[in-house]
Image (cartoon, rainbow, N blue to C red):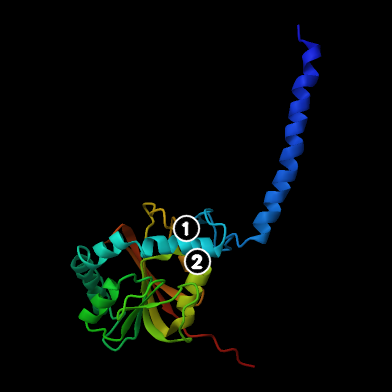
Amino acid sequence: MKDVANQPRSVIPRCFFLSLLLPLSFFIFLSLKSTNKPISPATTMDLKIRPVYTSYDNYIHHQLHKTTNPKLRQIWTTRDWDRKIRVFTHFFSDLKHKKLISNSSKALCVGARVGQEVEALKRVGVSDSIGLDLVPYPPLVIRGDFHHQPFDDETFDFEFSNVFDHALYPEKFVGEIQRTLKVDGVCVLHVALYRRSDKYSANDLYSTEPLIELFNVSDFVYSRKVDGFGLDTEVVFRKRKPIIQRS
């Protein structure tokens, strides 16, 4: 038989807990709305933003923690230097063979860190090449945020990036590439579809479909599997000519 006398004792703590929880939930809701919480319209089933950053400043600080790590920068500029240049040289030579890039191309490497990609482009004959990253590495890499590229519209013939997974706002990342690409310019991304990236990634990509949707003023050229330092897929786009409306 139930002990009726004990029922109020169990109900009161429960009511007290709910009375605390409801105002707290409302406070959290208001706090999230008032902060720069990343809620990207690009988030889909195949592109998910990681809900780990409370503000854009927090995101930048986290990215700089990796980019400025002295041990990593030592590895990037010594042990990894020749190995990565060799691999990137192979990638870019193949793109030249496919006529997606030429010696006369003006090229940008987005998220280049210490610039192995830039050096590789120069070694295959694309001398007018520069890298962009949060931390500069002269003369190969200048300082800049890939969400807000410091370049004029239609500056480059070719843009390459293997840091799409670090984009907190993928639509801005892609939008800046398309803005700074010339008409008929080519963008090549190396992304991870079949494995998850490291703790510094801001998004997870599961297919090429979100990229095709984001590159809304470009044509999808092809995708293929590659072995690019943990990245497994190469995706290529070409910026198309704008449609001129006749009156």
Report the side of 41 relative to 165 (left or right): right
Kindly identify which numbered label has been placed on residue 219: none
- Residue where numbered disc 1 is placed: 203
Report the side of 215 relative to 222 (left or right): right
Q: Residue at x 67, y 50 (%)?
A: 28
Q: Are marks 1 and 2 in contact (CB under 8 Å)?
A: yes
Q: How many labels does the image show?
A: 2
Q: Residue at x 45, y 86 (%)?
A: 154
| Quadrant in which the N terminus appears | top right
Choose between 177 and 20: the one closer to the eye.
20
Q: Residue furthest top?
A: 1
Quadrant in the picture for residue 9: top right
Residue 243, relative to residue 7: is it above or below?
below
**Which comes sooner in the sequence, label 1 or label 2?**
2
- Residue where numbered disc 2 is placed: 170
Query: Which percent across, then down, holds residue 176?
Result: 48, 76
Quadrant in the picture for residue 230: bottom left
Q: How crowded is mark 2: few (under 14 residues within 10 Å), some or many (20 or more)?
A: many
Query: Which percent across, then down, holds residue 237?
Result: 40, 74
Residue 82, relative to residue 127: is it above or below?
above
Report the side of 20 relative to 223 (left or right): right
Query: Which percent across, then down, holds residue 186?
Result: 38, 79
